[in-house]
Amino acid sequence: MVIADIIVPLFVPAHRPERFAKAAAAHPDAVILDLEDAVPAEAKEAARAAMNCAFTDLPVLVRVNAAGTAWHAADLAAVARLQPAAVLLPKAEDFNVVSRVADAVGPVPVVALMETARGLAVARALAAHPAVARLAFGSVDYCADLGCAHVPEALLAARSELVLASRLSGLPAPIDGVTTALDDAAAAADDARRARTLGLGGKLAIHPRQIAPIRTGFAPDATEIAWAERVLASGAGAVSVDGSMVDEPVRIRARAILARRGGAAG
């Protein structure tokens, strides 16, 4: 699976190698070995030493500590040795920093994690960086930076900007931030569904229980599938379906819905 196909990547603390295989067994689309927030300062070195990709055939990403921290350089050196599927760069907000990260890790692509107002302000420039394979949204840190609540209406503009920045640079749709409620499957599914309606293409998971609800949220429901099938059965040109005009842009959306279902797109 390539970075573009990842819908649900699951975080696991990199200093807990006994959890690596368990994370993969939960069937996410990728496993993110986390060197940053999930790892206390005294365990950073052990976490770097514990990292490996041998526990799974899934893509393995590594979230390093941000540029300017005491651990950043050593993290990049560990990534360069490991050669995972991608490096997740937190608090991405500087084109030159992305270049230095890319130089340090070699051919490993960068997923730029947008977590600050400064990062959002340069999202289009970062999306255009040749080393950046995808954007992701660090919504909790973003809210902390802005002093706003972690609620949909406060995050709408940021999510929409990341979708637009990705599209302008031809990147896959960005990965949405986490749902902080670990035991609320409905919240995870609702958040994923909302992200999909805005044009995001995936969502970060912080617990295995969130994987299935997130997939549900990103999959079209029966009503959408039935509508898409009626649209594609309507023929060519401009016609009426369910009292609404249908032309080629509408058929493009219908094909995308059926593609997400996994069926033929007609």
Image (spheres, rainbow, N blue to C red):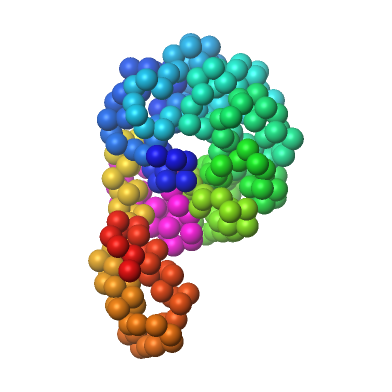
Q: Position of residue 200 (x, y in %)?
A: 48, 54
Q: Position of residue 256 (x, y in %)?
A: 40, 63
Q: Quadrant of residue 105?
A: top right
Answer yes or no: is residue 173 visible. Answer: yes
Work out which quarter of the rendered image holds the N terminus and state it.
top left
> Residue sitting at 41 percent across and 22 percent down?
53
> Residue sitting at 56 percent across and 30 percent down?
108
Q: Is residue 165 above or below residue 255?
A: above
Count of numbered circles on the image: 0
Q: Is residue 250 above or below residue 35?
A: below
Q: What residue span does the magenta drawing correspond to?
A: 179-205
Q: Is residue 234 above or below residue 156?
A: below
Q: Quadrant of residue 134?
A: top right
> Residue sitting at 63 percent across and 47 percent down?
127
Answer yes or no: is residue 161 visible. Answer: no
Nearer the observer, 194 or 243: 243
Residue 120 shown left or right of residue 29 in the figure: right
> Residue sitting at 48 percent across and 59 percent down?
199
Nearer the observer, 15 or 187: 15
Residue 216 highlighted magenta (yes or no): no
Residue 235 shown left or right of residue 165 in the figure: left
Q: Position of residue 99 (x, y in %)?
A: 70, 33
Nearer the observer, 138 or 222: 222
Q: Position of residue 31 (x, y in %)?
A: 40, 32
Work out which quarter of the rendered image holds the C terminus and state it.
bottom left
Nearer the observer, 59 or 39: 59
Which residue appears farthest toward the right when viewing the image?
96
